[in-house]
Amino acid sequence: MKKAKIAVLVSGGGTNLQALIDAAGRGELPHGEFSVVISNKPGVFALERAAKAGIATCVVERKAFADKPSFEAELLKKLKEYDIDMIILAGFMLVLSADFVKNFPDRIINVHPALIPSFCGDGFYGLHVHEAALAYGVKVTGATVHFVNEVTDGGKIILQKAVEIQEGDTPETLQKRVMEQAEWIILPQAAEKVAAQIVG
Ligand code: GAR
């Protein structure tokens, strides 16, 4: 079967990358294969997870470049080197420019730890998202996987899953529950859906 060549972009611990690797290991990503994991930060645990799974890794550091266009040009070069069909942002903490995104229309997906259009957009990433949800007092939050376009967290929604907030939740306990009950489930499902569309 033809497979979409996937690059996973990461910035940190890589639990979502692990969920993708595990799902593929269970045969749940038949239309995709991981060609490379790219981190914008050296030394992050996501790179170890990738190496352990036998996936090529590389680091493209934002601060190694004078400006965003030259950083993104290097990123694009790497993606071309691996002949990438599809990009998964799995805990990637930089916002990609409109110029970059234009190279991969409907080919970049992102997992966001809230139910878009709540608690999303510039400044809403990682734990901040859960802090904002708790501060607002919502009773239900969740995760969203969406296509990436020129608007931060603004692309078409692919999958969403709701998660209940519990009495006494902290940003950390909520983050863990949203990951376990939503992100790690819907990210691999959405990846397979998009990969199948690409190679289908
Ligand atoms: C995840 O909760 C992911 O949804 C979020 O950061 C965490 C990364 O964890 N991403 C964003 O906030 C992007 N806007 P991980 O490195 O363990 O997958």
Image (cartoon, rainbow, N blue to C red):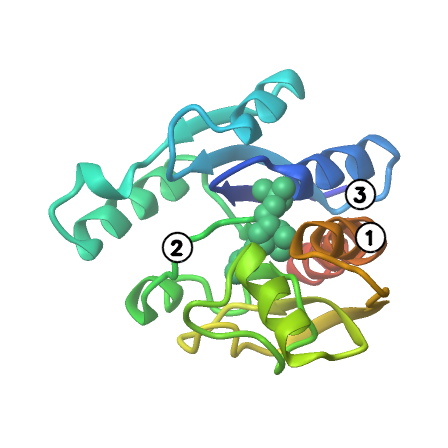
Q: Residues within 10 Å of mark 3 (few under 14, many from 20)?
A: some
Q: Quadrant of the N terminus?
A: top right
Q: Residue 177 or 25: which is nearer the viewer? A: 177
Of callouts 1 and 3, which one flags the residue occurring earlier in the amino acid sequence? 3
**Mark 1 highlights which residue?**
185
Say left or right for 123 vs 158.
Answer: left
Alpha carbon of mark 1 to alpha carbon of mark 2: how far?
A: 23 Å
Residue 119 coordinates in the image, percent (x, y): 58, 75
Say left or right for 11 vs 111.
Answer: left
> Residue at image x 67%, y 44%?
16
- Amino acid type, callout 1: Ile
> Residue at image x 85%, y 65%?
167
Of callouts 2 and 3, which one flags the residue occurring earlier in the amino acid sequence? 3
> Residue at image x 53%, y 50%?
85
Q: Residues within 10 Å of mark 1 (few under 14, many from 20)?
A: some
Check disc 2 and report its element: helix, strand or loop.
loop
Residue 150 coordinates in the image, percent (x, y): 40, 75
